[in-house]
Amino acid sequence: MGDPMTDPEGTQMRISARNQIKGTVLDVKKGATTSHVRVDIGGGIIVTSSITNESVDDLAITAGGKVMVVIKASDVMIAVGV
């Protein structure tokens, strides 16, 4: 999307990752140390991210919140067949 992100203090942040997709948090399921955050990015597509519980708390991520999904991967694997 290319839009600068803004932190809670209103400061604009720039990031090198180009795969930035705006979305809405559907739910946050906390485990012992890691949370699964499901984000609706539109068109019936849901992206799930595993992040630390500490990050969920620090970023105040809650259902209904607007977030930016940032995808930066050195490897993307695809498997077919059984």
Image (cartoon, grey):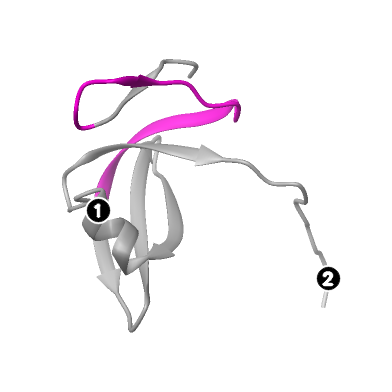
Instruction: Estimate how packed mark 1 is, as few (under 14), some (14 to 19) or many (20 or more) residues with alpha carbons within 10 Å.
Output: few
Dot 2, crowdedness within 10 Å: few (<14), some or many (≥20)? Answer: few
Q: Which circle, 2 or 1, is nearer the viewer?
A: 1
* Camera-side residue of 36 and 34: 34
Picture layout, residue 15 above or below residue 55: above
Is residue 36 found inside the magenta-colored segment of the image?
no
Q: Give the mark nearer the N terminus: 2 vs 1.
A: 1
Q: Is residue 21 above or below residue 35?
A: above
Q: Residue extending furthest bottom?
A: 32
**Residue 81 horizontal/vertical position (percent):** 83, 70
Residue 81 - label: 2
- Which quarter of the picture shows residue 13? top left
Q: Which part of the image, by quadrant, shows the C terminus?
A: bottom right
Three-letter code for the amino acid on which mark 2 is drawn: Gly
Q: Is residue 27 left or right of residue 16?
A: left
Question: Where does the magenta region start and end?
Answer: 8-25
Q: Give amino acid for label 1.
A: Asp
The residue beneath circle 1 is: 58
Which residue is found at the position 31% from the left and 37% from the top?
67
Residue lying at 28% horizontally and 20% vertically, measured from the top left: 11
Q: Secondary structure at mark 1?
A: helix
Quote the CA–CA distance across marks 2 and 1: 41 Å
Picture residue at 44% right of the left edge, 57% below the top: 48
Q: How far across and how far down the image is residue 79, in percent?
A: 80, 64
